[in-house]
Image (cartoon, grey):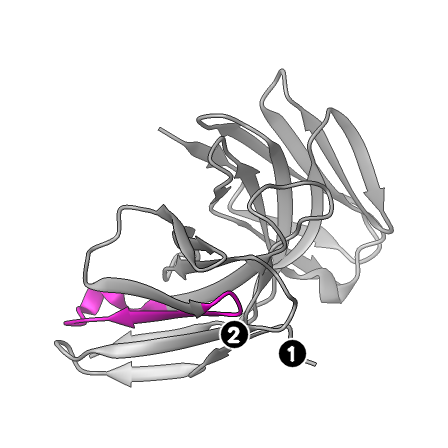
């Protein structure tokens, strides 16, 4: 059973287009995240939702808009795609907004976005 | 600012022991996590230290010294499958996970 799933796995698109990435977790977790990993493998948090409520919004261009229809889903919509948006985007989830030795983050398989 | 420093690359021989260090400077600190990521894969959780000392999980151990803002991941009895990138990550005061730039471990036969 897949714990955190993302679609699509690969996304190739032209500059200026609008695209969405979907994420679903079947772990019953309350908190979900979007991370961006660039070509140098630097992993940076973008957004976090706890029970459908936005709790972390890093300095991300407003072309990026997360949406959480329910606590099991967190989608990422990107408007007017730019070359610099090319990266791997990971969704993750954890059981609560705080951390303990048991609150690990479970990552999805990633979506490799290439903007041409 | 927030920063985590770890070596960019480490090479070791199969069966050996390797230590990957991490020093951090962050706004607030709840704990230090370690994640493993194979090429083309997703980060997977290895360990978490909230208190000073050594945590052991099988072949992997993680150490934390809060007073030194320092931790390390120790991998014993290295296997070829351990070749991957290893990230330290700090849970900061707003419960965000701040990742280091990763250490690429290459295990040679």
Disc 2 to disc 1, how far (Cα)? 9 Å
Q: Give A33 or B44, whichever is nearer the viewer.
A: A33
**At numbered mark 2, what does the secondary structure look like: helix, strand or loop?**
strand
| Residue in the picture at 79% in, 61% down | B79
Q: Which residues are magenta?
A: A70-87
The answer to which quarter of the image holds residue B67 is top right
Q: Residue at x 65, y 31 (%)?
A: B71
**Residue A100 circle label:** none
Q: Is residue B62 magenta?
A: no
Locate residue B49 relative to residue A19 in the image: left or right: right
**Is residue A79 among what the camera can see?**
yes
Q: Chain for mark 1?
A: A
Left or right: B98, with B34 as reference point = left
The residue where tag 2 is placed is A24
Q: Does A13 appear above or below A36?
A: below
Return the residue nearer the eye: B72 or B99. Answer: B99
Report the front residue among B74 and A45. A45
Mark in the foreground, 2 or 1: 2
Residue A42 in view here: no
Disc 1 marks which residue?
A2
Kindly identify which chain the residue marked by label 2 belongs to. A
Q: Position of residue B50 (x, y in %)?
A: 69, 31
**Residue at image coords 87%, 51%:** B58
For the C terminus of chain A, the image quarter is bottom left
Report if residue A79 lies within the magenta region: yes
**In which quarter of the view is residue A109 placed?**
bottom right
Q: Position of residue A38 (x, y in %)?
A: 36, 60
- Residue A105 placement (x, y as % from top left): 60, 55
């Amino acid at each position: 059973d897949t714990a955190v799933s993302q679609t699509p796995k690969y996304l190739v698109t032209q500059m200026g287009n609008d695209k969405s990435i979907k994420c679903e977790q079947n772990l019953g977790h309350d908190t979900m995240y979007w991370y961006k990993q660039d070509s140098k493998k630097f992993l940076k948090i973008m957004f976090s939702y706890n029970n459908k409520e936005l709790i972390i919004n890093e300095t991300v261009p407003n072309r990026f808009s997360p949406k959480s229809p329910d606590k099991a889903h967190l989608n990422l919509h990107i408007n007017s795609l730019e070359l610099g948006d090319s990266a791997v985007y990971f969704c993750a989830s954890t059981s609560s907004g705080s951390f303990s030795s048991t609150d690990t983050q479970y990552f999805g398989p990633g979506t490799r976005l290439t903007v041409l | 600012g927030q920063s985590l420093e770890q070596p960019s690359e480490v090479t070791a021989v199969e069966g050996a022991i390797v230590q990957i260090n991490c020093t951090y400077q962050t706004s607030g600190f709840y704990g230090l996590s370690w994640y493993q990521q194979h090429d083309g894969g997703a980060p997977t959780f290895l360990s978490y230290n909230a208190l000073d000392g050594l945590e052991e999980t099988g072949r992997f151990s993680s150490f934390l010294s809060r007073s030194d803002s320092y931790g390390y991941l120790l991998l014993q009895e290295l296997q070829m499958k351990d070749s991957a990138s290893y990230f330290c990550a700090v849970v900061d005061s707003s419960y965000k996970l701040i990742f280091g730039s990763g250490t690429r471990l290459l295990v040679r036969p």
